[in-house]
Amino acid sequence: MLLENKIAVIYGAGGAIGGAIARAFANAGARVFLTGHRRAPVEAVAKEINSSGGSAEAAEVDALDEPAVDQHLQSVVKRAGRVDISFNAVGIPDAKTLGVPFTEMDLEQFSLPIASYTRSYFLTARLAARRMIPNKSGVIMTVTAFPAKTGTRMNGGYGPAQAAKEALTRDLSFELAPQGIRVVGLRPHGIPETGTMKELFEIKAAGVTWEQFQEYLASLSHPRRVMRLDEVANLAVFMASDQASGMTGTTVNLTMGGVAD
């Protein structure tokens, strides 16, 4: 029960990674407030958590909408008294931004993921920090990806967006650590259980089977296997807990050797 009595807000909780982290946080004792752009997937995760004896509440919140994020956090503080953990697992659709060579990509296609990912992370982090500072305690977290640290083909602005999030993690930590707030990220790679990887496969893996695509992902790691959702979620629990009190201003490398820091 590493997160017993902690109050956690998770953005993008209807997605595979956000949902896995929500379940893991709840299993570790946290009271979780789940948000997503669409209510139905988030409610499904909350229902599963509550039926297993956890405590979860769902809300429809657009993490790119500052007033919506602010109002939701106000309601969390009113109901739970504080915010201990803010986790941004927000994703955006890839169909319009991936699979196009740079020479054929227009400016909007390139800029969309950079603007969306960084804006969402900035808004959720800043507004959570405002609630955490009075208590001199809190953890702000996000998830990035393999292209943040290495070159990839036909990913448009996705790689720069993930690199920008890692830079923002460092800058947020530098400002907020004196206020007792830790800021950390997780960088997994190629989780076939996520809808994002299946969408990526459909966009970019012409002439390759799903099995061959997974074998390719596995070949990039030292143990020659793909990352599992539960591995990411378990590490998220530890990083959000007081056991990781010495970790801030960094992104934890979960690529299993795929990229080096």
Image (cartoon, rainbow, N blue to C red):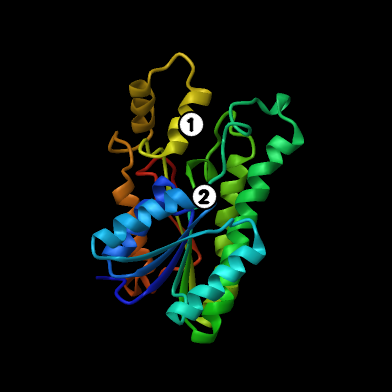
236 vs 106, left or right, is left
- Give residue 38's mark: 2
Looking at the rendered structure, the number of numbered marks drawn on it comes to 2
Q: As shown in the figure, which amino acid type bears the numbered disc 2?
A: Arg
- Is residue 171 visible in the rendered image? The answer is no
Between residue 192 and residue 173, name the one nearer to us: 192
Mark 2 Cα within 10 Å, few/some/many (few <14, many 20+)?
some
Between residue 47 and residue 119, name the one nearer to us: 47
Mark 1 or 2: in front is 2
- Give residue 199's mark: 1
Q: Position of residue 106 (x, y in %)?
A: 75, 31
Between residue 159 and residue 137, name the one nearer to us: 137
- Is residue 220 visible in the rendered image? The answer is yes
70 vs 4, left or right, is right
Q: Position of residue 252 (x, y in %)?
A: 42, 56
Residue located at (55% from left, 81% from top):
133
Q: Secondary structure at mark 2?
A: loop
The quadrant holding residue 65 is: bottom right
Residue located at (35% from left, 37% from top):
221
Question: Is residue 156 positioned above or below 28 on the image?
Answer: above
Q: Position of residue 223 (x, y in %)?
A: 27, 38
Residue located at (32% from left, 38% from top):
222
Mark 1 Cα within 10 Å, few/some/many (few <14, many 20+)?
some
Q: Secondary structure at mark 1?
A: helix
Question: Is residue 154 positioned above or below 171 on the image?
Answer: above
Q: Position of residue 163 (x, y in %)?
A: 58, 49
